[in-house]
Image: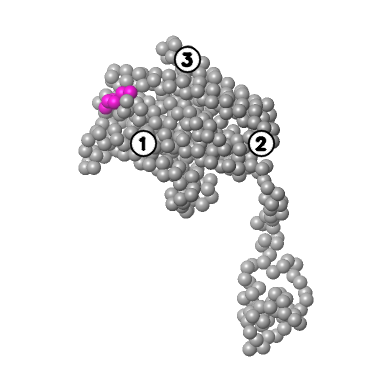
Amino acid sequence: MKQFWGWELATYLYLGGLGGGMLCFAAVIGLFLEPSLVTSGSLVWVLLWAIIIICIGVALLVYELGQPIVFERAFVTKTSVIKWGAVVLVLSCVFAALFLIWEITWFNFLPCIPYEGFAKLCLGLAGFFGICVMVYTGTMLSSLKAKAFWNTPALPMLFTISALSTGACMDALLFGHFPLPAEWLQAGAFLGTAEWTANMHEVVEFLHVADLVLAIAEIICLLLYVLLMFCAPASTDAKKVADKWVRGSWAPIFWGGMLILGLVVPVCFNAYGLAMGGSVLGEYVAPIMVLCSGLLFRFMIIYSADRKLYAGEERYYNQAGDIHDEFCTYWKPGATYFEVVNAADFDDISVPEADPKTPIATKLKWALNMGEGTPEPKPAYPR
């Protein structure tokens, strides 16, 4: 088994889904739940952090691909799944940024943002592309047929539910806060007022209820997903991965870390907080635990589904030398050819003195020990 992808991709999948979930819930709140100027001002801090989170995830993806300088190829490769992910990631950030431009008074001089309906449109489009980002993070993995544990339609659904859950938690932690000067907002006059506070509490309670429902759904889907893979035929790779999760080396992390501490305990804390009308456990501890669970889930998915190498690949990785090995640095490409052809006193290889009219092809044969009558001494490494 060989691990081809590492922490960069796992973190990118987490941050992309988290940012998409934040944008989705922001659109639901701003367009349907509380469509008011106060709500729009409360969403500024949420959307700002959503943009930052998605941009960090995109930077990690570009870094993981190994060629940051030619990152634009991700947008023009027609057959790549990454292309659609790159497009929806950029569009979600662009429309979220346009919403912020209208809400922040710095840009009031711009003539292209004349009315509030434009901000609502941008918020709706940001939420739509946020949903696309959430679905894409799971679709990218499920499209890889070489890994049976990923190659299932259930994975995008599970990633989407997890992204919505983490997005609701992050929105609940950030909603209603704006630690910058109030005069920077269009709705800055409402900041800190009773109307602002009442609006914040109502929306945060909605987010906690949504997270409670989503966490329960995630528990059910996660158990079904893993246990169905566990019950697969014994010869499949998916069965081996699920066995590692259920009763193998990953079992303590799966049952204790991700399932119990990451989902079951936060559900209990959240339910207790809603029943008591608010508590530290439900408002802060539970969301943080759910966020950690989402990150752990991505890392487990990436690091446990190793791909078995074919026989040819095994030979390649076992026989390929290191770039610093002596035989890789001994010969400089082309040096022998040019020195033998262009110089008569080349000392490294014994060649007969060539007549000025001797063709270059004949000289090259002598240099490569291919012609008749050429010397026999062989160098330490083939040239």
Q: What is the C-alpha distance between the residues marked 2 and 3?
A: 40 Å
Query: Can you tell which quarter of the image residue 257 is in?
Result: top right
Query: Can you tell which quarter of the image residue 181 is in?
Result: top left
Task: Give coordinates of residue 44: x percent, y percent.
Answer: 34, 31
Residue 45, can we see it? Answer: no
Q: What is the C-alpha distance between the residues marked 2 and 1?
A: 40 Å
Q: Name the residue that disc number 3 marks.
A: 271
Task: Give coordinates of residue 242: x percent, y percent.
Answer: 64, 31
Instruction: Identify the element where label 3 is drawn.
Output: helix
| Position above or below: 280 against 27 | above
Observer-nearest of 100 and 22: 22
Q: What is the C-alpha distance between the residues marked 3 and 1?
A: 30 Å
Locate residue 352 relative to residue 157 in the image: left or right: right
Task: Choose the circle earlier in sequence order: 2 or 3.
Answer: 2
Q: Residue at x 54, y 18 (%)?
A: 265
Mark 2 touches mark 3? (CB < 8 Å): no
Q: Amino acid at mark 2?
A: Thr
Observer-nearest of 110 and 146: 146
Q: Is 310 part of what is drawn in magenta? A: no
Instruction: Identify the element where label 2 is drawn.
Output: loop
Q: Which residues are magenta?
A: 33-38
Q: Give the colouring mode of the picture.
A: one colour
Q: Name the residue that disc number 1 marks.
A: 126
Q: Name the residue that disc number 2 marks.
A: 236
Q: Amino acid at mark 1?
A: Ala
Instruction: Identify the element where label 1 is drawn.
Output: helix
Residue 116, can we see it? Answer: yes
Q: Is 35 part of what is drawn in magenta? A: yes
Q: Amino acid at mark 3?
A: Ala
Badge 2 crowding class, 10 Å Cα cut-off, few under 14, some 14 to 19, many 20 or more, is some
Observer-nearest of 321 and 247: 247
